[in-house]
Image (cartoon, rainbow, N blue to C red):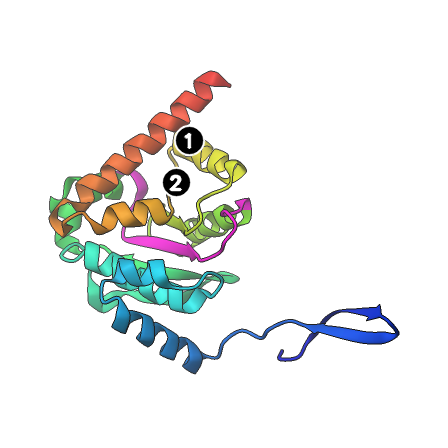
Amino acid sequence: MAGEKDRSAKRGGVRRIRTRKSPPTPDEVDRLVARIVAAHPDPYAAMNAYPHGEGSGFERLLRQAFCHSLDGFINASLIRTNAKVGEGRFDIELPIDYRALKVEPLFRRWSESYGLLSLIIEGKNEKRRGSVSAFRQIKDYLATAGLGRVGILVCRSGHARTTMNRIYDEALRNEFLILPFSSVELQAMSRIPSARIPEWIHQQEVILKQRASLRYKRA
């Protein structure tokens, strides 16, 4: 709420009120996204230029970026955003095209191993690293949505060590696959042609499971 009291202090007999800035309105977000996209037509460059802290516009750019990279592998007409699942809402659902599930080795394997129908993407546009609660959130979505057990947790500033440990544990159990992406992976992904994106994503999966196995051996 605009003008909401956050805390107060007395200095020199004068009571000073600090206020918390209210979140932008949908119209303000629309104008911000339009301005950034006009300056940065590439969706990955637009995400990189987008201010930290505001979620809805970042999620819109995130959807555009993944749609661009996975062009030919997803059913664009069935994409959902901010869809309700149980008590929450996941950010982006990218339904995998039926032909890709049958022909593309990565998606066929995920279909067989994780029941993949759609990729669920959760985005966190924060300056701090992604927390364990973000991991729990996307895992809960995967467990209840009935769209498969593969998700991508995008935390722009990276993932906290405790969060990565949970992701590693899950990778070793092989029940859910949650790929951790940060601005580093997004920048790398922006340079990969669409035809090679499944191969690149597979590499990220292999690296994740190798690191998880190494952590287990060191424990």
Give the residue number, with chain letter if any, for mark 2. 176
Amino acid at the residue labelled 2? Phe
In the image, residue 2 above or below residue 52: below
Residue 31 shown left or right of residue 126 in the figure: left
Residue assigned mark 1: 173
User: In the displayed structure, would residue 67 be above or below residue 177?
Assistant: below
Which residue is at 41% across, 55% downward?
122
Residue pictured at 21% horizontal, 40% vertical: 200
Residue 52: x and y in percent read 46, 60
Question: Residue 71: x and y, percent?
Answer: 16, 58
In the visual, does 6 lie left or right of 203? Answer: right
Q: What residue type is labelled 1?
A: Arg
Q: Is residue 95 left or right of residue 163?
A: left
Q: Tell me if mark 1 has few (under 14), some (14-19) or many (20+) residues whose alpha carbon lies within 10 angstroms of its own.
A: few
Indicate whether residue 127 is drawn in magenta.
Answer: yes
Residue 111 part of the magenta segment:
no
Quarter placement of the N terminus: bottom right
Compared to 188, does 175 lie above or below? Answer: above
What residue sits 64% from the left and 71% below the top? Answer: 20
| Location of residue 155 in the rendering, given as x and y in whole percent from the top left corner | 43, 50
Region of the chain picked out in magenta, as a range: 113-132
Which quadrant of the structure image shows residue 175?
Answer: top left
